[in-house]
Amino acid sequence: MDWREGRAIALVGGGPSLLETLPELTKYYKIIACGSVHDYLLDNNIIPDYCLICDPDPLMSKYLTKWHEDCIYLIASQCDKSVFELLIKGNGHVAPRCFIWNCGGEESFNQEMFKNQEISIPG
């Protein structure tokens, strides 16, 4: 492999070629699950280093039904409330490494969802 510093990352999204390329993911330094692919990777014994969710559609909560303690979750504040409920409140537990990027959501929503300001990244 001729990658810069031997540290290539994989930005993984859902799509028809993913099934063919799953074995290749073990070669990457870091794996970032983007959007709907998170649970699919976990179901195939691939633990992403990061999970990035920014889609405001409530449907995203259907693709993020579990979380893994070794994954860092980067969630945009514009995401639907159901996504936060899964990660922050799910079954009384909190995803241990969940960070919310505040991309200018409504202040009342932010105050309700982000009572612990330590997990919010304003920007």
Image: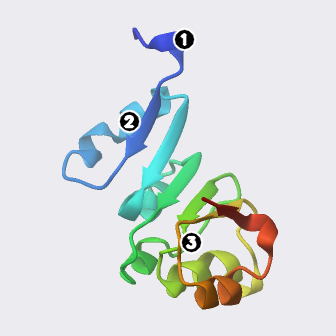
**15, above or below 59, in the image:** above
Q: Position of residue 13 (x, y in %)?
A: 33, 51
Q: Position of residue 64 (x, y in %)?
A: 48, 71
Mark whose residue sits in front, 2 or 1: 1
| Residue under pointer 1 | 5
Amino acid of disc 2:
Pro
Q: Is residue 40 left or right of residue 96?
A: left
Residue 66, numbered label: 3
- Local secondary structure at mark 1: helix
Is label 2 in contact with label 3 (beta carbons under 8 Å)? no
**103, above or below 81, in the image:** above
Compare residues 95 and 21 and report the one nearer the observer.
Answer: 95
- Local secondary structure at mark 2: helix
Name the residue rendered at 36%, 79% in the picture.
57
Q: Is residue 106 left or right of residue 15?
A: right
| Residue under pointer 2 | 23
Amino acid of disc 1:
Glu
Compare residues 78 and 21 and report the one nearer the observer.
Answer: 78
Q: Quadrant of residue 22?
A: top left
Amino acid of disc 3:
Lys
Graded by Cα atoms within 10 Å as few (under 14), some (14 to 19) or many (20 or more), the crowding at tag 2 reads: few
Q: Is residue 104 left or right of residue 90?
A: left
